[in-house]
Image (cartoon, rainbow, N blue to C red):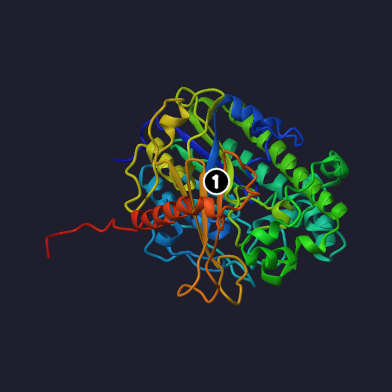
């Protein structure tokens, strides 16, 4: 059965940013950042305070969202790896249920570097793809739009006379995402079908630039300083010292190479990017209202992973699984289903969104999906969930010569991060252990604390059980032998 003829099938709008940490949001208690439209969405729906992605880098995380599977199940273990073909994506499931599916912006379920181009997944009719605002991809819908509508800006950015991040607002990648989404809602969708549309913003991904009118809203020296303590790296795994010196396994500037003033400028630019996205989200929400779609549309706002932003003496992302790297904003609104202004502290995961999409569409879940739907929680009901979260890093960003392999499990207020050793890698076994109730900023590593030895052993055993529990055993057993 499809939902193409059903008038009660809700539309679905998924808005996703890139590299937005959980607390880069006014509604999350950040009084330094301006996000009035996202705060409005949070007030009209449900805000999840503990949503964990399955990887701290783009492609593995995004593959988990589209397949509903953990990284070790879907097999896209690193940026630059194509999603293995046997995996079924949620677009195919929704299209089979009668949904008109489309996307604008980034996708990143395949290698996109050095002229490579992605193509629409099964079930996606409209695919307005641009991996990022920069030069390099062989196909880029944003560049075509920019050349047609703002040829002077396109020429200047191509020549290096202006940064792609700092082009005027009317020519910016984030504005293009907003424009394309508004166009889909007004004229681009098939009106006889429910739609599933993904608006994938690139901001607030580095390189840390924004149009002048947005950057000028923030005074860098007035913003809070990075969260760290003197000597913190001495108590943390050795790869963090490497990443502090040089980000991206030596391919980008590290925290240690930035002055205190430069770190504040980075934060100001990052916040400016978020505010720019917020304004575009406001335009999109206003369009839903104007088109009479708001009451019949599930709106989800989230991000694929976080950003270190100088905390713990680290920048960008990589082999680090702090909350600012793997915990993301999650706002869900479906009038009449989700509560208004509901705040949910339960531990949830990105793969739960995948199951939520199929639940809303009224179709079968993905056959190998591993998520649990969030609609009951989002309604404000107190229902049991799994009670833990898993995130994995398998040398997933720029590769370290000695592979850096991490597994994170959080259960209640305890979080363990195992930095695997032999035989998985020639690095030595190290780790992190945090009591988030007493140390929410993850500054005190209890891994080597004798008083925490029993807790470490219990959490290590639990992490092993989680990995076994999340193996893909979806293939049916046809007989005893």
Q: Is residue 231 left or right of residue 322?
A: right
Quadrant assignment for the C terminus: bottom left
Q: Is residue 161 left or right of residue 383?
A: right
Which residue is outermost to the left?
A: 480
Q: Quadrant of residue 440?
A: top right
Label 1 crowd (10 A; few <14 / some 14-19 / many >=20): many
Can residue 124 be seen here?
no
Residue 409: give x, y in percent of width and height.
Answer: 48, 51
Residue sitting nearer the eye, 336 or 145? 336
Can residue 83 be seen here?
yes
Residue 456 vs 383, above or below: the answer is: below
Q: Quadrant of residue 314?
A: bottom right
Question: Disc 1 marks which residue?
Answer: 198
Q: How many marks?
A: 1
Residue 35: give x, y in percent of width and height.
Answer: 71, 34
Residue 245: give x, y in percent of width and height.
Answer: 74, 66
Residue 119 vs 361, above or below: the answer is: below
Query: What residue lies at 83% left-to-right and 55% top-to-bottom?
Result: 153
Residue 324 vs 13, above or below: the answer is: below
Residue sitting nearer the eye, 23 or 330? 23
Quadrant assignment for the N terminus: top left
Which residue is outermost to the front?
A: 450
Residue 384 vs 74, above or below: the answer is: above
Secondary structure type for disc 1: strand
Query: What residue lies at 74% left-to-right and 51% top-to-bottom?
Result: 229
Residue 137: give x, y in percent of width and height.
Answer: 65, 66
């Amino acid at each position: 059965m499809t939902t193409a003829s059903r008038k009660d099938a809700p539309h679905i709008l998924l808005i996703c940013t890139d590299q937005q940490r959980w607390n880069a949001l006014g509604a999350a208690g950040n009084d330094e950042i301006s996000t009035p439209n996202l705060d409005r969405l949070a007030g009209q729906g449900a805000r999840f305070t503990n949503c964990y992605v399955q990887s701290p880098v783009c492609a593995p995380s995004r593959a988990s969202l589209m397949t509903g599977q953990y990284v070790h199940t879907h097999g896209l273990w690193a940026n630059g790896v194509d999603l293995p073909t046997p995996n079924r994506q949620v677009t195919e499931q929704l299209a089979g249920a009668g949904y008109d599916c489309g996307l604008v912006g980034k996708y990143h379920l395949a290698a996109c570097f050095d002229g490579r181009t992605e193509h629409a997944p099964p079930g996606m009719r409209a695919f307005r793809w641009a991996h990022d605002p920069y030069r390099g991809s062989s196909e880029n819908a944003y560049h075509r739009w920019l050349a047609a509508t703002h040829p002077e800006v396109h020429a200047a950015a191509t020549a290096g006379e202006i940064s792609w991040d700092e082009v005027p607002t009317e020519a910016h990648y984030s504005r293009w995402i907003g424009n394309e989404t508004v166009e889909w809602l007004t004229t681009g969708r098939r009106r006889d079908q429910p739609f599933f549309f993904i608006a994938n913003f690139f901001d607030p991904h580095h390189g840390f630039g924004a149009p002048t009118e947005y950057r000028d809203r923030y005074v860098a020296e007035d913003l809070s300083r990075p969260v760290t303590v003197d000597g913190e790296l001495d108590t943390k795994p050795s790869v963090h010292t490497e990443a502090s010196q040089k980000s991206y396994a030596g391919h980008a500037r590290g925290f240690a190479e930035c002055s205190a003033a430069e770190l504040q400028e980075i934060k100001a630019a990052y916040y400016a990017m978020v505010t720019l996205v917020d304004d575009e989200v406001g335009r999109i929400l206003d369009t839903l209202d104007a088109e009479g779609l708001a009451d019949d549309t599930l709106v989800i706002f989230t991000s694929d992973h976080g950003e270190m932003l100088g905390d713990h003496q680290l920048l960008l992302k990589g082999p680090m699984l702090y909350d600012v790297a793997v915990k993301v904003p999650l706002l869900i609104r479906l009038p009449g289903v989700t509560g208004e202004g509901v705040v949910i502290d339960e531990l949830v995961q990105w793969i739960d969104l995948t199951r939520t999409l199929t639940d809303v569409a009224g179709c079968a879940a993905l056959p190998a999906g591993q998520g649990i739907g969030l609609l009951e929680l989002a309604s404000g009901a107190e229902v049991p969930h799994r009670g833990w979260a898993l995130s994995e890093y398998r040398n997933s960003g720029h590769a370290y010569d000695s592979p850096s392999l991490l597994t994170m499990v959080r259960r209640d207020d305890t979080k363990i991060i195992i930095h695997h050793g032999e035989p998985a890698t020639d690095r030595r076994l190290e780790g992190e252990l945090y009591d988030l109730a007493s140390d929410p900023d993850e500054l005190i590593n209890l891994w080597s604390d004798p008083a925490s030895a029993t807790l470490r052993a219990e959490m290590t055993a639990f992490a092993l059980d989680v990995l076994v529990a999340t193996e893909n055993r979806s293939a049916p057993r046809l007989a005893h032998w």
